[in-house]
Each structure stands twice: as C-alpha cells, then as structure tokens.
Image: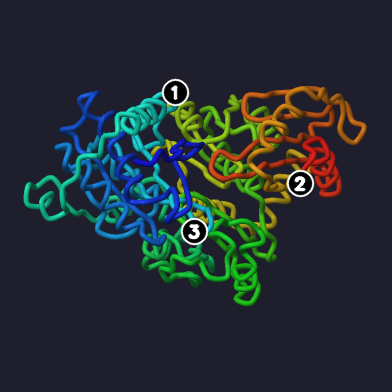
Amino acid sequence: MSSPNIVFGTDGWRAIIGEDFSSQNVQLCAQGVADYILKNNLGSKGMVVGYDTRFGSKTFANDVAQVFAANQIPVFLSSNFAPTPVISYNVITLEAAGAVIITASHNAAEWNGFKVKSQYGGSASVDVINEIENNIREFISDGKAPKLISLEQGKTLKLIQYFDPKTSYLEHITSVIDFNLIKSYPIDIAIDSMFGAAIGYIKDILSGYEGRIEEIHSTEDSTFPGLLKPEPIGPNLRELRDTVLKGEYAIGLATDGDGDRIGVIDNTGRYLSSLQVFSLLTHYLLETKQSKDPVIKSITTSKMIDKLGKHHGTKVINSPVGFKYLGALFMENDALIAGEESGGFAFKGHIPERDGILSGLFLIEALAQTKLPLSDLLDKLYELVGPHYYDRLDLTFPERERPIIEQKLKTTKVTNFLNIPVSDFLDIDGYLYTLIDDSWVLVRFSGTEPLLRIYAESSSIQNVNRLIGEARNLTGI
C-alpha cells in the first residue's frame, strides 16, 4: 500500500483529485475517523455524511458511508449536495457523533477535501484531529485495508439511510433571523452561488419575500467556469458587481464552494473586504442585541473589532486561524460572534461554525433594521472606528524552500515597517507585527493550500500595499 501524506490543516485534509485524493485514501481517512468514534463509544449515535458540487464528491461521500457502515456505525447520508453549515447543523438535529463532509471549500476545481465535524456541529478539535491522524498513520504502517461493504449491503442492514438536510436547517434559520423585520423592509438582492453547494438556499429561505432576488452562477458545475476558484473575494466577484450595478440592487451576496463563507458587494458596486463585513456584523449585533457577550476573532482580522469591543464594553479574544480554534473559544466563552479573515463567521444561537448563508441574512436584517444603504453603514462604522483598509497577497513557492523561508522569518528581528516602530509581535500562528499606529502585517503559511500569505491593514490602501511589499522582501520570495 502506498503511503499518502494525509495531514489535516486548518480545516480538514485537502489534495488534488486523482493524485493523493483518491477513493483509497478517502477510505483510509474514514477508517481513521471510525476508529476514533468506536474508541470513544460514540458508534451507536451514528455519523452524518455530506458533500458539495465538486467532481467526484458524491462518490467519495459514498466511500465514507461504506467504511462507517462496515464498522457498524450507522450513517445518515445526504440525499443531495449541501452546504457545510447545513450538514453541520444536522449533526445537532440527528444527535449524531459528528459528520464528515467531502469538500475543498474555496479551493480550485482540481482539489477536493475531507472535513470532520464533532457532535456539537463544529470543526473537530485539535486533539480529535491529532488522534484521527495517528489512527491513519498506524493503519498505513500496519499495512491494513479499511473495512468496507457496499452501499446496497449498508442499506439492507439499515446501517445507511438517506436524509434531506435542508428542511431542518431552514426551519432553524427562521428562528435565528428576524424575518418579520426583513419582510417589513424588502430590498433587492443579487446572489452569486459560485456554482457551489449553497445554490438556492437564500432564495428558498426568503420565499414569499417582496423584494427582487436574482441569483447568478446558480447551476451545479464542478469546473467553476470563469473562476480561478470558488472563493468570494473581489477578483472573483466582477459579474456579481456588474449585476448589482445593472439591476440597482441594494446588496450582492456571494457564497463559496461549500457555503460557509460570504463575500459582499455594496449598493455602489464596491467589494467589501471580509474585515469590513466582520466589523459591520459585529457592530450591528452588539448594538441591536445590546449584548456584552465576547467576540472571538482570528489574528488575521481587523483592529476595528478591538475598537468596537472597547466602544461597546465587551471582551475581544484573539485566536489562531481556523475554526477548530475559533469554534472552541466560541463555545468556551459563550460568544456573540466569531470570525476570521476568510469571510467565515459563526453566530450565537447557531452552531459554532462558519455559515455564509446566515451571514448574508444578518446583513439583510441590518439593512432592514437601519433602513440605510450598505455604503452608509460602512461610512458610519468608519466615523466610529476610523478608516481601515486591508489586502492580502498569496505567494506560491517551491516546497523545498519552506524551511529556508521559515528560518528567515523566525530569526530576522523586525523593529519597524514603513519606518513606523513595531509595538507588538505575536507568533501564535505565523508572524504578526503590530505598529504603533495600529497598522499590522502578518506573514503565515496557509493551512489548506501550498501558499505563503501576507496580510496587512492600515489607514490607507497605499500603506497597505507598502506593508505587503516590505513583508514580501522579508520572505525573500
């Protein structure tokens, strides 16, 4: 048996389809999860299995179901592709031991992935993932093959049953969002589903809504035509921007390949960064809910969150990147909202997991509550916390050079950027430099792709670009 390099990053294991990502290796991962479930006496609760619109996802989901069933673990297998937060929520309604979701989220079309969710509906903890990885390594080293039965056998033995994950999720979301408020102030909405798993969800939730709703890229397509990858960031949302401007829509909302992230175009056609969106959501929830519950943010997110925390008198807690960290802090602190730079946000009263669909609905609710254009809400936010601009640069590099780059970042003492002194330094997840004017720059390796990422935020876009440039010089790439 070959020895694949199966390593779970910030959100599951991802690999190229047909290379490392094969049925054989997916079955190995499923056996690693099954061994964990059985060792912890959770087998009788069963596991939920879901998948997205990517090439082969349904087949890989069947592989997982067949392994679980062969290990006498009941399987709730999604009857159709579904967004990650929808499958995650059904872990709660089905009282299952957790879920496996076949998806590579926002990665390019040639990738697929294997996400693991725990019984609370959020990303599996670091300890759980470590145990699953150890199980997989031991299985490979022992030369064993995963247990496997056919789908038909699994169904005959009543170990595999299909279910529709959509119904319970839609019912739950109506209890989280103020739909009477939304329906009392209908606005026109453009949606870009990016050919992904969230196709039709926002339209279905807003069924009977009097505002216009136009959805683009709303057919299942595993090649994500016209997109480098289904990631809801500015360069990928030009068609959504054009749709907003042409149709004079109040807001444009985009969900990524598996529906757990959100991208936003405002009424002027401007792309709002994930940091702006997180800050708008945080301000809205703190103000309207009059909550003092903590806010959880990854180290890649905005200083605006810290300023909003001070303004509203609530605690802000920093986290490493990845919802296996943010989700744990979210639950531990009974938080109001948690967010990261990727555009993924979790909300009180829901699962401790990113949900791009719910994020979009909260923005629609905010527009109904304030009766202001989205561009005005951003202006008002800046009046409170000052202007903040942000960008991110993704760099590819030969994998053999990673130790050299890491060593350079680890040993180089940086005292300033742009001749502005560094006031604080953190290395809990990458290398984060905060300057005395509250600008910051972060250099870190992606946990899901072979990339080095440079993030920066400052009071002008010119400073952001210069910060990224100086940080790139630091890496030598």
Q: Which residue was labeled with disc 2?
A: 389
Q: Amino acid at mark 1?
A: Glu
Q: Position of residue 332 (x, y in %)?
A: 44, 23
Instruction: Look at the numbered disc 2 and give the secondary structure of its residue.
Output: strand
Residue 431, image quadrant = top right
Q: Disc 3 to disc 1, how far (Cα)?
A: 37 Å
Q: Secondary structure at mark 1?
A: helix
Give the residue at x 72% y 29%. 432
Q: Which mark is residue 110?
A: 3
- Crowding near pointer 1: few (<14 within 10 Å), some, many (20+)? few
Provide the secondary structure element on which disc 3 rests.
loop
Q: Position of residue 23 (x, y in %)?
A: 32, 51
Hey, what amino acid is under mark 3? Glu
Q: Which residue is mark 1?
A: 332
Q: Residue 298, labelled with which disc?
A: none
State the separation of the CA atoms marked 1 and 2: 31 Å
